[in-house]
Amino acid sequence: MKTKRATAPSIIARKNTGKKIVALTAYDYSFSRILDTTGIDILLVGDSLGMVCLGYENTLPVTMEDMIAHTRSVKRGNTQALLVSDLPFMSYQISVEQAVSNAGRLMQEGLADAVKLEGGTSEAEKVSAIVRAGIPVMGHIGLTPQSVHQMGGYSVQGKHYSAARKIKEDAKALQKAGAFSIVLEGIPGSLAEEITKEIKIPTIGIGAGPHCDGQILVLHDLLGMNLDFRPKFVKQYANLGEQIQSAVHDYISEVQSGAFPDTEHTYNQKETAIRKMEEAV
């Protein structure tokens, strides 16, 4: 029996229920179709696709066209989860008008249910304008990957009092602007707990400890498909990277030895068809 599709209001309503919100990234139809059978609450088409799918060093080269194409792909496999799509680098920073226009493209062309953007007080005016346009917005503060060069790398944010206070101000500004939820990335668990208690919209943590209203991970990290690194906050629930390598090695070996394809995996003509061919000759 299918469950009711998740919406921004239904995610907000989870804030005080005690039932954690569960989110994952997704980048294509195949994984989206599988995840659609699991009861996941939110699918995020993250600009992390730049690193996971496109092989970039960071998220900065990802374009609106990339995001639209991948979001449409995920949409085709999803019937249950709230589908959120990232506004990529320089698609909203220039002006309010640019932010609203590109958020609209992710909804209209990408078929997203909501958009996500990075930044707090500095982006609150844009969040407010996007919300006024009828588009649900998920915020993202703390470690914000689009600011990797400004931060000097992927380091934990909010460890000191002034930085922690700034992140709390960012969270409150996003709430006031109308965001329906906020991703807290790469901050101390105690800070995430304080923010979660002080705001009325859900917090979704990634590297932010256990006290957020929900959690999100990059799907490929969860499945052990990232061969390059594993952040401290990632728990691998499978090791598909090694399983895929093993399967492909077996395939190579069987093709080279002649063991594949065997009779079980080969089409055979019916005897009557063979006779007719022989008669025709």
Image (spheres, grey):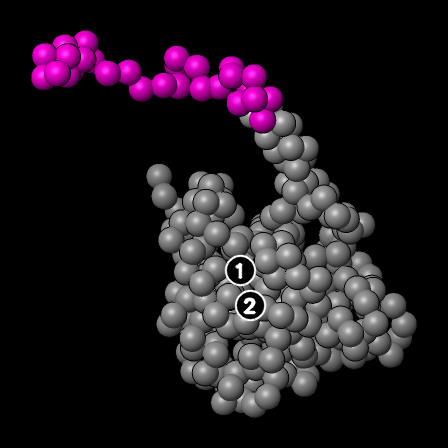
According to the image, label 2 marks what residue? 86
Say which label, 2 or 1, has the lower sequence index: 1
Identity, as a three-letter code, of the amino acid under mark 1: Val
- Dot 1 corresponds to which residue? 45
Q: Which residues are magenta?
A: 252-281
Alpha-carbon span between mark 2 and mark 1: 6 Å
**Visible in this render: residue 89?**
yes
Q: Name which residue type carries label 2.
A: Asp
Q: Position of residue 146 (x, y in %)?
A: 68, 72
Given contact means CB atoms under 8 Å apart, are the residues at marks 2 and 1 in contact?
yes
Q: Identify the image quadrant of the C terminus.
A: top left
Say whether residue 262 is magenta.
Answer: yes
Q: Which mark is residue 134?
A: none
What residue is shown at x 45% (from left), y 71% (from top)? Answer: 106
Looking at the rendered image, the quarter that the N terminus falls into is top left
Instruction: Give residue 265's position: percent from left, percent from top.
Output: 39, 19
- For residue 21, side relative to residue 186 (left or right): left
Residue sitting at x 51%, y 86% = 98
| Residue drawn where x is 40% and y is 49% of the image | 77
Instruction: Determine whether 257 is above or below 29 in the image.
Output: above
